[in-house]
Image (tube, rainbow, N blue to C red):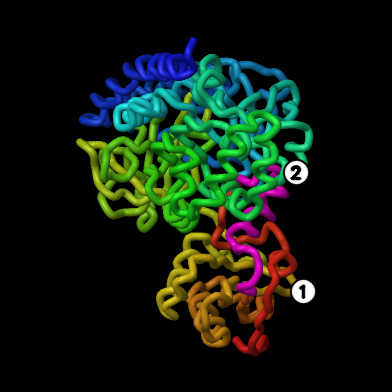
């Protein structure tokens, strides 16, 4: 069969298979309370005879009010005992359904978590994916006839947690029926080797070669925009090395790519390399916002769409309406929202516009009133269902009990930018641990002129507005904040940051954090550490 016809047929099948979920989603948007009640009671009734269900008397729960009165809000630590039992081979612990696998996640705190994954949880994810796919194909019908790249990590050997497999055999399995059976027919598939598992460079080469070979590429879907940014940076800075892998597969295509690279400016390069590329989907909010904007500028002329909020544990929101932020995936799980100011817990139909909330979910994977630690801003409503923008992970940096929240750090950095009229987008705080003390160091690009002393003083004043930080300064546990000026004649700091973490994670697809102590950054970046009056409080 002609490849274009095959891809059109496969994508059309995916579209029509997703259509019932999209229709159901549209109906639920007008009455989220009813949809949410149905989801909750289905989960409770199905799992009332489990060990967890008996412990918390699910059989006595009649509605959402009963549920919120009798079931406590939980964190991952509350499930470790049950997860150990599931790993040991015991059934009906958190869910009546058998646990298919544990999906690992670390979050931004670095703690290893094992999230139980069931068939019903996968179906709940599809209830969010289906309306997104239908809306995407409706807006970009040409995507159906082209190849698509759905970002995947290099294949790894699956491990086990006791008797339960850990992780999907392939990332595309998140896509359900399509990911398992139809994905290879339409997707760009990098040819990963053993080298790809141990080297970020090999991962880049394999992925970029697969993309360059597909002139009919119509859709790129990645999680972090940093992954695509790094691939394009590699192409522009090492074009000969990037194209070398293409020669072994198609010399004609490789020659054409070389000609295009030599003739085109960066802003036009990608539209000529991939003339059918209609859309790039990736994270656009929170700590990804800056790199997202840089990527849009780099690939000017190609449409971008920010993803909704999707985590290992739950599918929370999806882009659905033009001009609005992602809307709550009201048919996926049961959602609650904790007001970031007064702590009040609201349901989907009760949240208020322009207020910030932490997300709490109940899913068919066995998480009940589980605090996600994701902070969102309700920006409006579509019909009667809230639209939301992801702000940050609810996490903290804590060397000596200062409990510096990542969200607060992000606001401080923005305040520094505004106060000193800094235009450069690269900045983060490094919690530097010394032998018996520590300090917070602000990393800034040297490409702009500024007074390091004034910025360090201003940052220290902002930090001391936080009680626990000030207490740690007063006790001498923390020294005065410093500044690290990154030399402007070195590699793009965005690229260096992500490459350093990508090497550690083996994928290059990593999250930018406003406070980052994962690596010794003063040893990785070339620059000068500025410290002023360390003894002052």
Q: Quadrant of residue 115?
A: top right
Q: Helix or strand or loop: what does disc 2 sit on?
A: loop
The residue depicted at 64 percent of the width and 38 percent of the height is 113
Between label 1 and label 2, give the one nearer the viewer: 2
**Is residue 215 on the magenta stretch?**
no
- Closer to the N terminus: mark 1 or mark 2? 2
The residue depicted at 71 percent of the width and 69 percent of the height is 522
Q: Which residue is mark 1?
A: 436
The residue depicted at 58 percent of the width and 21 percent of the height is 51
Q: Which mark is residue 139?
A: none
Position of residue 528 in the picture relative to residue 424 (left or right): right
Q: Vertical placement of 117 versus 267: above or below?
A: above
Q: Which mark is residue 199?
A: 2
Q: Are marks 1 and 2 in contact (CB under 8 Å)?
A: no
**How far across and how far down the image is residue 77, in percent?**
61, 41
Q: Quadrant of residue 323?
A: top left
Residue 285 shows up from this direction:
no
Q: CA distance from mark 1 to mark 2?
A: 35 Å
Q: Vertical placement of 443 versus 196: above or below?
A: below
Q: Residues within 10 Å of mark 1 (few under 14, many from 20)?
A: few
Position of residue 364 in the picture relative to residue 403 (left or right): left
Q: Helix or strand or loop: what does disc 1 sit on?
A: loop
**How far across and how far down the image is residue 507, in percent?**
66, 42
Q: Vertical placement of 526 versus 75: above or below?
A: below
- What residue span does the magenta drawing correspond to? 486-509
Q: Nearer the viewer, residue 435 or 517?
A: 517
Residue 444 shows up from this direction:
yes
Work out which quarter of the rendered image holds the C terminus and state it: bottom right
**How far across and how far down the image is residue 349, in percent?**
26, 38
């Amino acid at each position: 069969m002609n490849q274009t016809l095959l891809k059109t047929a496969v994508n059309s099948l995916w579209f029509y298979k997703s259509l019932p979920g999209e229709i159901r989603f549209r109906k639920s948007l007008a009455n989220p309370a009813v949809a949410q009640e149905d989801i909750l009671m289905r989960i409770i009734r199905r799992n009332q005879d489990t060990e967890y269900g008996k412990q918390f008397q699910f059989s006595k729960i009649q509605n959402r009010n009963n549920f919120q009165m009798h079931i406590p809000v939980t964190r991952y630590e509350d499930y470790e005992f049950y997860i150990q039992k599931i790993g040991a081979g015991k059934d009906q612990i958190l869910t009546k359904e058998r646990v298919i696998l544990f999906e690992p996640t670390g979050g931004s705190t670095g703690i290893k978590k094992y999230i139980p994954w069931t068939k019903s949880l996968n179906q709940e994810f599809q209830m969010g994916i289906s309306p997104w796919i239908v809306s995407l194909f409706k807006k970009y019908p040409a995507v159906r006839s082209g190849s698509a790249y759905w970002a995947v990590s290099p294949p790894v050997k699956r491990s086990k947690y006791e008797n339960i497999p850990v992780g999907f055999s392939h990332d595309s399995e998140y896509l359900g029926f399509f990911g398992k059976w139809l994905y290879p027919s339409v997707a760009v598939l990098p040819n990963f080797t053993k080298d790809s598992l141990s080297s970020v460079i090999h991962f880049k080469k394999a992925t970029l070669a697969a993309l360059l070979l597909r002139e009919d590429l119509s859709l790129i879907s990645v999680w972090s925009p940093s992954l695509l940014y790094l691939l394009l940076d590699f192409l522009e800075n090492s074009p000969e090395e990037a194209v070398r892998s293409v020669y072994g597969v198609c010399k004609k295509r490789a020659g054409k790519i070389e000609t295009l690279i030599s003739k085109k400016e960066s802003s036009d390069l990608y539209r000529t390399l991939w003339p059918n590329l209609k859309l790039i989907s990736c994270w656009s909010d929170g700590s990804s916002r800056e790199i997202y904007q840089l990527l849009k500028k780099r690939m000017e002329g190609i449409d971008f769409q920010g993803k909704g909020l999707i985590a290992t544990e739950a599918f929370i929101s999806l882009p659905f309406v033009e001009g609005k932020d992602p809307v709550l995936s009201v048919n996926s799980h049961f959602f609650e929202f904790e007001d970031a100011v007064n702590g009040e817990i609201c349901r989907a139909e009760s949240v208020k516009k322009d207020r910030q909330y932490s997300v709490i979910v109940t899913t068919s994977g066995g998480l009940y009133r589980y605090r996600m630690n994701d902070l969102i801003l309700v920006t409006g409503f579509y019909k009667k269902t809230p639209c939301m923008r992801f702000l940050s992970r609810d996490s903290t940096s804590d060397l000596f009990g200062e409990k510096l929240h990542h969200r607060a750090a992000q606001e401080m950095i923005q305040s520094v930018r505004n106060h000193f009229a800094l235009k450069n987008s690269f900045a983060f705080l490094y919690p530097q641990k010394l032998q018996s003390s520590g300090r917070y160091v602000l990393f800034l690009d040297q490409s702009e002129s500024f007074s390091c002393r004034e910025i360090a003083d201003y940052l220290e004043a902002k930090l001391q507005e936080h009680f626990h930080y000030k207490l740690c300064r007063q006790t001498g546990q923390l020294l005065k904040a410093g500044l690290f000026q990154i030399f402007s004649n070195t590699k793009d700091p965005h690229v260096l940051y992500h490459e350093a973490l990508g090497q550690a994670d083996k994928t290059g697809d990593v999250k930018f954090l406003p406070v980052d102590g994962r690596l010794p950054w003063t040893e990785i970046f070339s620059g000068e550490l500025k410290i002023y009056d360390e003894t002052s409080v």
